[in-house]
Amino acid sequence: MKYQTVMMYMEIGCFVSCLCGWILVCSTLPTEYWTFSEVGSAVITTSNYYSNLWRDCISDTTGVSDCKDYPSMLALPVFLHACRALAVCAVITGFFGGVLTLIGMKCTKIGGTEIINARVTFAGAVTYIVSGFCGMITYSWWANRVVSDFVDPNFKEQKFELGAALFVGWGGAILLICGGAVLTYFSGKEGLRSSSSKRARRPVSYATGRTRRTYMQPPSSSRVTWLPPLYYSGRKTRTPGATTKISPTYSQDTFV
């Protein structure tokens, strides 16, 4: 199997992995089960409390549930605003990462040449990694806050536990980071090294008398300096075996 075919299948696999991860991250935003808690000693009187970034909900054993949005946006803590911003950034960057990767893939042939496609794919892969890290920070920060309140003996308010949305988000973020990392390695290896190799060995012209000679300049990392042959404008070559003519010398007594 050719190298280009292997690269094409690899790009498709990484794109599908990142797309699935982005869908999982997007699915956690409308889900209410970021945290949950059960209150009640009997089955009939048990109530379930759960919440997410946008609202608080409650349900009982009869199946009746009620959700209420947070009353004031300015009254919310900075922690909740930061989690909202990171979650939205994860969704937006994941969308643009999918667009760039779809344009730069070898199977679509939209970007142009192979080098341009590799660079566009590299940009999309980096955007996917940023999306994965934004989601990972959001879910980890939220989980750390919930666990800290739960194990704190001085916390007297209602204690919550980790919801299912956090685990789904962690899985999506891992898919984004892993797929983007693999795609970044192979696309960067193809797109960035090709440009650096062309820039390293560029032709350099040196004028030597009436002729103009062209030499290939080695990479900057090499310690050997390539120079043209030494040439002196005032120096003349001698022909082997040629006799040298000695001009006569005259003095003042010769003409007296």
Image (cartoon, grey):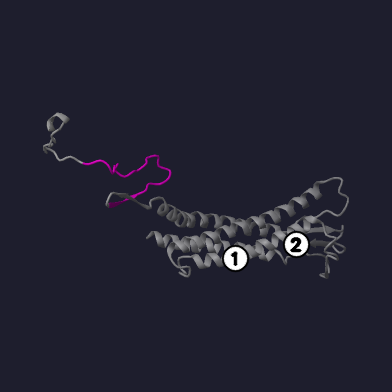
Residue that badge 1 annotates: 96
The alpha-carbon separation of the residues under discs 2 and 1 comes to 27 Å
Element on which disc 1 rests:
helix
Q: How many marks?
A: 2
Furthest-front residue in this view: 256
Kindly indicate the quadrant of the structure image that contains residue 176: bottom right
Please state which of the two labelled residues, at mark 2 or mark 1, is closer to the viewer: 1
Can see residue 74?
A: yes
Q: Residue at x 37, y 60 (%)?
A: 2
Chief secondary structure of the magenta span? loop
In the image, what residue type sits under mark 1? Phe
Q: Residue 218: x percent and y percent?
A: 37, 46
Q: Residue 209: x percent and y percent?
A: 28, 49
In the image, what residue type sits under mark 2? Tyr
Do callouts 2 and 1 mark residues in contact (Cβ within 8 Å)? no
Residue that badge 2 annotates: 33
Element on which disc 2 rests:
loop
